[in-house]
Image: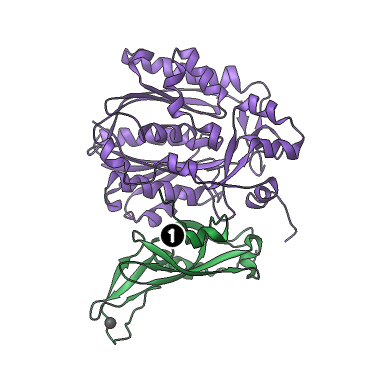
Amino acid sequence: MPAYTVPVPRYWRRIGTYYRLEASRCRNCGRVYYPPRMRCVCGCKDMEKIRLLGGKFQLIDFTVLHSVSEDFEKQKPIFVGIVEESSTNVRIITQIVDVADVSDLEKSREVEPVFRVVKRDGNVGIICYGTKFRPKIVG
Amino acid sequence: MAGISGWGCYIPRYRITTREIARVWGDDPLRIRDLYLIEEKTVESYDEDATTMAVEAARRAIARSAIDPEDLDAILVGTESKPYAVKPIASILIDAVGARYNIQAVDSEFACKAASDMMILALMSVINGRYRNVLVVATDASQGEPGEHLDYSASAGSAAFVISRDNTCVEVEDFYSYCSDTPDFWRRECCPYPAHGEGFTGEPAYFRHIVSAARGLMEKMGLRPDDFDYVVLHQPNARFPVRAASMLGFPIDKVKPGLVVDRIGNTYNASALLGLVNVLDQARPGSRILLVTYGSGAGSNAMSMIVKDSVEERRGRAERLQDMLETKIYVDYSLYSRFRKLIKMLQ
Ligand SMILES: [Zn+2]
């Protein structure tokens, strides 16, 4: 049997979170969680599903990683940033891609979600897709 | 009448110039440019493939159409560079765009032509009333053997269209197909790079099929080149479409708006369709467009389209191809090799 490292059922259960940036919002106090939670810190369990994908995003902060985990070894250095969705103030830690130069990220903080490969599980396992962010074309 | 209700595209931001490729492989860059008339081509990043580009193009087409993704009745993909040998891109698109699960979804292959076949099938399904909206996506991240002809042109890109019965902004008037067994280009199972019949890709393949499909459609509809404002042809390089258009009697200014290969390379299934996107990004309402795709093996689909008034209100709903053409990051052949995984390592 070839060796796989990605637990397929877990990836499959999170497809909405990874692809469509689905978050959960508490119907009692309005707190929003990404990744989604079943229960709010206020104790309420009545959570509704919302989609962050169509929102506007700002880069709050970022760093450049030269020492990375095995999955990102062939992409280093990688940019990792904290991105905030403007209508919910939800913050996401994410890879920032298509960066020509660090100064790009300093000039404009507007970023947009892009659908990308997050991990290819060896030569035989699944390809895990998900959402990353990149500098938005400001035109 | 049935047609397109939304269009969208995606090209990677990375580019490599044909001059840089020629430098690495010891070719004369001027001769190479003269041969293909390609300045630069797109390069997919390390984390991009035919699926990721399809998702981006599809989301933009849906945004322009302004339909609820749950109103899609089918998702049809044309590609020849599926990341999985078995497992469709169309299935990933369902979840990535937020479509319903009780729909039809499938990937199809006919070299660079399959996506236009899916457009025709989508049109027929909305004309007969069974479906209301069908998402059609052309996507490819194709590779050529390093240092060989295709290394100068094979690139990455995606174009997507929502084909609808109502709410259209482009009406498709008619279509015409022309196919035969012509082995000009192929790839056997497990071969990483395609092979082509040397000197066989032009006359009996590209020109015969493109010209026959275009003439067949014009004859069927009783139209002449004068009746069209734009002609958009499959563009493996910039020489072939210009020559085919001239054989058909179209002046160069009707070809130019639909010619993007010089700046992005050959995006295979998306090749002519990105040309169409560029035309829809700028064409005046009332314009008539002749689109002719081509796939090796070989065959062509010709379609005649009329741009409606509603095209203008939809342009601003997503980035234009022109914006994407201007947003670019150049890479050298070393980074290109890394992005395209040309460097093989022992695992
Ligand atoms: Zn709460």
Residue B177 location, quadrant:
top left
Residue at image position (57%, 52%) is B45
Residue placed at 39% from the left, 63% from the top? Answer: A57
Residue B222 vs residue B327: left or right? left
Answer left or right for B198 relative to A87: right
Q: In the picture, which chain is green?
A: A
Q: Secondary structure at mark 1?
A: strand
Can you tell which quarter of the image residue B3 is in?
A: top left
Where is residue B7 shown, x and y percent of the image?
A: 36, 40
* Residue under the point 63% across and 70% down: A68
Compared to B218, does B294 lie above or below? Answer: below
Left or right of B125 on screen, residue A77: right
Q: Which amino acid type is marked by label 1?
A: Val
Work out whether residue B230 or residue B89 is closer to the camera in this orientation and state it: B230
Q: Residues within 10 Å of mark 1 (few under 14, many from 20)?
A: many
Q: Which residue is mark 1?
A: A111
Residue B254 relative to residue B24: left or right: left
Question: Chain coloured purple: which letter?
Answer: B
**Residue A97 coordinates in the image, percent (x, y):** 53, 58
